[in-house]
Image (cartoon, rainbow, N blue to C red):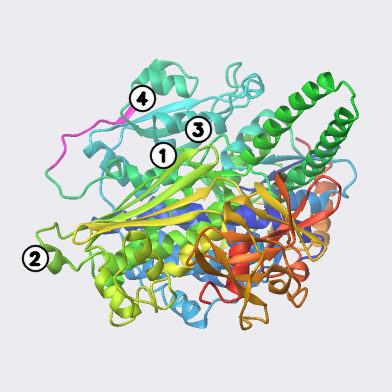
């Protein structure tokens, strides 16, 4: 069973992401509405994948990635940033902070599902 | 739209409206700061965030016209954010036009239409904004902070702390440590943040790595940095922490003799920023589905009632069943009221938007206006709020454009240069709200209005209002850029009456004018007259009908309006025009003899609609006709009267428009 954390301050966006991924066998989704909530949930429970928005109140996605990578227990956790900011500079900043993948909105349900399937497959042996 | 996500459109419009409300509130904060010669980096960032989120969401559901506007606004705001929140008033003005455009696009979607493209001129103006931002100066402030926390503070956040300290508030840090047990008890960073936000203004929340211990099993803690006047105990309690753990980051300094005010001076505007924390967001369609499900229950209850009545007429003992039935009726009414309350929105939320309107008007009219908005706890149905807002805007525009004098005129009249405009919302009862817009301007010049209308001077304010409401009449010699042609009063009145409400006015020369709109809190349940006309059954809101008179002995006249047969009929000694209802609806030639006539209550002169037979009075749940193919002028919805047959509910005010008003 794969535990997926979906982080976005837009409820509709979170639900759309979950709707796109509903067909994945055995995936269980948890939603977080802010970067702070995401960090809290990640510290209290094991997740296999994080889908992360960049633009959020208090602390943004880049800060979440930086924080996650600085935690011993979360260093190997796959984090895919899903963002509207498709420019190269944003992408570089996010990847430099330690994100695993980068995907721009809008996306098609198929493209998202394919990415997630790939990440869950890779992460399966990545030991935590 | 991205395939498979079409079902999210309704949820999209609901959430988009929230982002827009947040953006409006932030724009107001920026405006308030700019007027004091300050920048407001936090509000600029929040405005940026709201638009960015809206853009992403719009792109997902494929609403390209909204993406086009929000993308450009976002670009300009990102530049302003990078420059420490600096932006100019003209820039803000352009951004506000952008917000208004997006609001109308979202409204169109909510109404089931396509979002219109934004005007090219606006898109170009927004695109040109990026260059229009200045650099911020970073004030040097020394803070007593853990370096890990200090590192995470942006320059504007440091400035915010410094300004707070100057205003006599303490900046403190309190830590929240999450755990599974706490999360199960509802103690999370999200709730902690909310609670702490109530005892002060949170500047920043920083996640920190700590040694994993029994107390901090996750190996993390959150440092909340806030400006506050509350005690350590209160701050600690809010974060479920020990009072001793609250640390002062920056102590208050004696207020410097400085003109620049601080955040503490913005309670009126800042309060807009506070969301309703305990709110659950429900798509309106879901609430309507509950109402729809409820309607047949009411209908079948009416059927049971009828059965009981005939049983009693047949000599049966119906006391017990009648008592149970009346109990049932009461509970059903309570249930329905509870469902209707779900659709209520605070009037304050709606009236708060008037701020933006007045601010723009001031600049274009050169007048000075201080706006006071007070809506207390008044609430009304979201549909009522949405529909009445344009009417409130019309009246406010009028007040600024026509009512309020120029600063010179006011000085000469011995008044303060700055006029006061009050917009007050009141809950009159559970069924009625009242919105009053009053100014302390010159008052309406009755003689001037009468002379422009070519009529004798009106006897009272009511007659004066009726005169003002004739379309196209303006007391100003030239149509101003602010109000456009005419007064807009006819539109305001039509909107209010269309909602089943009433518009009234009081004016005093030299002292000011006040317009009052009385509105029903909800549209869905109404008392209706039911009647027959041409073998069809109809209902019309009781509130729209003044009285029912005998329609015998009408005097036939020439055809009026869209071929509707018209006659004159006597009412209280005077002859009033009477239009055949069937003909007005385009369902017949209207030459048949009718027995009754319903006289319209409000708006202009009396007008009667001829019908065959009045069936009675009833309380019904009105369902709006949302299918545009079914939309007929003069029909506002359908109701089930108890026998399962849908009955058309008429909008008599609109029908009157359709046949050419009362100007027979």
Q: Which element type, helix, strand or loop, lies under badge 2?
A: helix
| Residue at the spot of label 1 | B376
Label 1 Cα crowd, 10 Å radius (few <14 / some 14-19 / many 20+) = few
Quarter of the picture holding the N terminus of chain B: bottom right
B634 is within the stretch colored magenta: no
- Foreground tag (1 vs 4): 1
Examine the image and state in which quarter residue B38 appears. Answer: bottom left
Is label 4 on the same chain as label 2? yes
- Picture layout, residue B336 above or below residue A25: above
Q: Are marks 1 and 4 on the same chain?
A: yes
Identify the residue position indicated by label 2 in the image: B412
Task: Say whether residue B222 is visible.
Answer: no
User: Contact, CB < 8 Å: mark 1 with mark 3?
Assistant: no
Q: CA distance from mark 1 to mark 3?
A: 23 Å
Residue linked to disc 4: B247
State the image coordinates of residue B503 (x, y, percent, origin top left). 44, 57
Q: Chain of mark 2?
A: B
Which of disc 3 and disc 4 is earlier in sequence? 3
Q: Nearer the viewer, mark 1 or mark 3?
A: 1
Q: Counting other residues with Cα less than 10 Å from the Cα at mark 4, is it few (<14), some (14-19), or many (20 or more)?
A: some
């Amino acid at each position: 069973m794969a535990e997926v954390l979906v982080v976005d301050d837009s409820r509709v966006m979170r639900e759309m992401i979950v709707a796109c991924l509903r067909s994945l066998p055995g995936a269980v989704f948890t939603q977080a509405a802010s970067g702070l909530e995401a960090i809290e949930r990640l510290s209290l429970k094991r997740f296999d994948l994080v889908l992360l928005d960049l633009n959020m109140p208090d602390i943004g996605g880049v800060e979440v990635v930086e924080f996650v990578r600085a935690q011993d227990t979360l260093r190997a956790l796959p984090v895919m940033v899903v963002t509207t900011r498709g420019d190269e500079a944003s992408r570089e900043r996010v990847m430099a902070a330690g994100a695993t993948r980068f995907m721009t909105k809008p996306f098609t349900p198929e493209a998202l599902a394919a990415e997630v399937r790939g990440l869950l497959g890779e992460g399966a042996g990545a030991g935590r | 739209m991205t395939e498979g996500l079409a079902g999210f459109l309704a949820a999209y419009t609901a959430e988009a409206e929230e982002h827009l409300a947040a953006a409006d509130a932030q724009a107001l904060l920026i405006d308030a700061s700019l007027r004091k010669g300050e920048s407001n980096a936090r509000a600029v960032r929040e405005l940026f965030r709201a638009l960015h989120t809206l853009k992403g969401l719009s792109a997902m559901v494929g609403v390209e016209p909204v993406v086009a506007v929000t993308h450009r606004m976002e670009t300009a705001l990102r530049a302003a954010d990078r420059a420490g929140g600096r932006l100019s008033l003209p820039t803000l003005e352009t951004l506000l036009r952008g917000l208004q455009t997006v609001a109308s696009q979202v409204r169109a979607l909510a109404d089931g239409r396509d979002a219109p493209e934004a005007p090219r001129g606006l898109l170009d103006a927004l695109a040109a904004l990026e260059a229009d931002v200045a650099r911020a100066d970073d004030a040097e402030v020394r803070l007593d902070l853990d370096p890990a926390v200090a590192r995470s503070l942006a320059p504007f956040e440091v400035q915010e702390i410094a300004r707070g300290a100057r205003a006599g508030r303490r900046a403190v840090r309190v830590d929240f440590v999450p755990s599974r047990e706490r999360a199960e008890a509802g103690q999370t960073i999200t709730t902690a943040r909310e609670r702490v936000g109530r005892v002060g203004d949170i500047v920043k929340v920083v996640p920190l790595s700590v040694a994993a211990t029994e107390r901090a099993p996750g190996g993390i803690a959150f440092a909340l940095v806030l400006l506050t006047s509350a005690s350590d105990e209160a701050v600690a309690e809010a974060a479920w922490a020990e009072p001793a753990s609250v640390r002062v980051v920056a102590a208050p300094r004696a207020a410097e003799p400085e003109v620049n005010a601080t955040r503490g001076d913005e309670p009126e505007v800042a309060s807009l920023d506070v969301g309703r924390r305990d709110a659950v967001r429900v798509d309106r369609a879901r609430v309507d589905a509950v109402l729809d499900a409820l309607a047949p229950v009411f209908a079948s209850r009416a059927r049971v009632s009828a059965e009981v009545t005939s049983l009693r007429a047949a000599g049966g003992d119906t006391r017990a069943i009648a008592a149970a039935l009346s109990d049932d009726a009461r509970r059903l009414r309570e249930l329905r009221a509870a469902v209707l309350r779900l659709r209520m929105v605070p009037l304050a939320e709606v009236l708060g938007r008037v701020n933006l309107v007045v601010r723009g008007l001031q600049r274009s009219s050169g007048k000075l206006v201080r706006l006071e908005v007070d809506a207390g706890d008044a609430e009304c149905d979201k549909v009522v709020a949405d529909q009445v807002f344009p009417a409130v805007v019309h009246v406010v525009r009028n007040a600024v454009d026509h009512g309020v004098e120029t600063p010179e005129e006011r000085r000469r009249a011995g008044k303060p240069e700055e006029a006061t405009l009050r917009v007050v919302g009141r809950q009159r009862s559970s069924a009625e709200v009242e919105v009053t817009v009053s100014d302390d301007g010159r008052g309406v010049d009755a003689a001037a209005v009468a002379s422009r209308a070519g009529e004798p001077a009106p006897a009272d304010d009511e007659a004066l209002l009726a005169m003002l409401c004739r379309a196209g009449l303006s007391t100003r010699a030239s149509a101003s850029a602010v109000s456009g042609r005419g007064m807009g009063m006819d539109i305001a009145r039509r909107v209010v009456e269309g909602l089943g409400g009433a518009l009234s006015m009081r004016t005093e020369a030299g002292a000011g004018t006040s317009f009052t709109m009385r509105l029903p809190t909800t549209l869905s349940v109404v008392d209706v007259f039911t009647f027959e006309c041409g073998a069809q059954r109809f209902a019309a809101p009781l509130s729209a009908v003044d009285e029912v008179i005998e329609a015998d002995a009408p005097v036939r006249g020439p055809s009026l309006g869209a071929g509707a047969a018209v006659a004159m009929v006597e009412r209280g000694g005077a002859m009033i025009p009477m239009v055949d209802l069937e003909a007005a609806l385009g369902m017949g030639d209207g030459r048949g003899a009718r027995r009754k006539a319903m006289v319209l209550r409000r708006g202009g002169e009396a007008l009667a609609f001829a019908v065959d037979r009045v069936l009675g009075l009833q309380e019904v749940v009105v369902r709006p006709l949302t299918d545009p193919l079914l939309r007929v002028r003069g029909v506002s919805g359908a109701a089930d009267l108890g026998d399962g047959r849908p009955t058309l509910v008429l909008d008599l005010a609109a029908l009157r428009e359709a046949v050419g008003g009362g100007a027979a």
